[in-house]
Image (cartoon, rainbow, N blue to C red):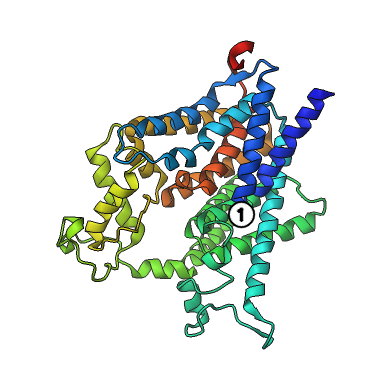
Amino acid sequence: MIVLNQQILYTTFLYLIAFFLPISQKASTICIGVLLLASIFNAVNIKPDLNLNLTFPALLYLIYCISLLYSTESQFIHVEQKASLFLFPAIFTLVKFTKFEFKSALKFFVLGCLTSLIICELFALYNSFDTTSLTFNSKTDDSVSFYNSLVEDKNLFFSYNFSFLHQTVYYAMYLVFAIVIMIHLKVFKNKQFQNLVIFFMILGVFQILNKASFLALSSISLWYCFLFIKNKKKALITLIVLLITAITLFVINPRFQNFNKKTVVIDETSVVEKDFKKIKNTSPRNHNFRVMLWQSSIEIILQNPIIGIGAGGSDKRLYEVFAVKRQWYDKAERHNVHNQYLQILLDIGLVGFFFFVLCFFTFFKSLSGLKDTQLKFISTGFIIILLINFIFESVFERYSGISFFCFFFCGILSFYRKTYFKIPLNFFR
């Protein structure tokens, strides 16, 4: 009876973490803490089987911690931000969840996404409606047109104003994954209602106006096209339609228009002052923000390829190089690379990147051993979403990103539970 009650407690907080991830960072953090403490208590009474695959994210976290020893700034916040790399492997090692329980957690995540999306819609609607004059205006600046309000992020129903619970790229990532889950799992009893929810979330992705989410959604759609359509002619026609639709949606995205106006190729001859401390703040050059950050990070990586420059001060060092390229310096500004692959190389070098790749190698290896078709397709969709978003964002640098990655990544890996060795009973005593 005690064991049964304990398992109910574990699964309850597993569901709460999944549900609150898209809604509240604070609530999900509290639930993670409670589940971790409960799982440690559980470890005293059992002999946990250590899943070697789950140790790789923890080893990656260890490397981050060690990098603070040679970093120019030993900022504890970087260790705290990435604690999920250790916490979730510990939780899924100490507590064994069934596939039914984990699939239920996926459903709760969908419910959380739906709840958060409704909150965002109602928030935008409430702030757009003036009760005194009984007028509706979603623009935050009346001097701009409706189209320009989308381009300049001045509309309550789009982009940053709409996605106030999470930064846009992460919220869009959540919604795309929720769509993948609903394609393979029956979350709602009524099929028509479930299809309506899928459409509602696709609309939400469009409202967020994140280019990476469009690319992820299009890639998954193309994958499904080859996966489920057996007739080659129908598959080809569907593929062409999807490509045209995806390109059209990407091009008409107002934020793409804004991206396209900026210079992508940086002319190094425009760099006048190479000492960032001597740069006079006149006006920042109109170069593409991300491309400039990527180029700046590559310069530093080539100087420190093996162990990187340490997680603590990488943002400061990156901005110094970035400021020289942009010829604009502001001490208050701090940026990450906006690319997870480059961020790993910058912070912990090729050593850390090796363990980063090893995490995904074991994940793909584990997928091949999964006999559950639903979970396999959902896991594949999850990894496609991640790998695409890694190109445009340093996912591990925000709680919204790293908690999402670790929760589902470790949860999926826990079902490929090849036992390598047992931890002695008195290990935790």
Q: Is residue 18 above or below residue 370?
A: below
SS class of the residue under badge 1? helix
- Specify whether residue 230 is in view: no
Quadrant for the N terminus in the image: top right
Q: How many marks?
A: 1
- Specify whether residue 304 is in view: yes
Residue 78 position, x and y percent, is 43, 41
Look at label 1 and name its amino acid. Leu
- Left or right of 150, for residue 41: right
Quadrant for the C terminus in the image: top right
Residue 116 position, x and y percent, is 66, 58
Depth check: give the residue in front, 239 or 198: 198
Q: Is residue 68 above or below residue 300?
A: above
Q: Residue at x 69, y 62 (%)?
A: 118
Residue to which mark 1 is pinned = 175
Residue 191 position, x and y percent, is 79, 54
Q: Is residue 263 above or below residue 338?
A: below
Q: Residue at x 74, y 38 (%)?
A: 12
Which image quarter: residue 268?
bottom left
Q: Residues within 10 Å of mark 1 (few under 14, many from 20)?
A: many
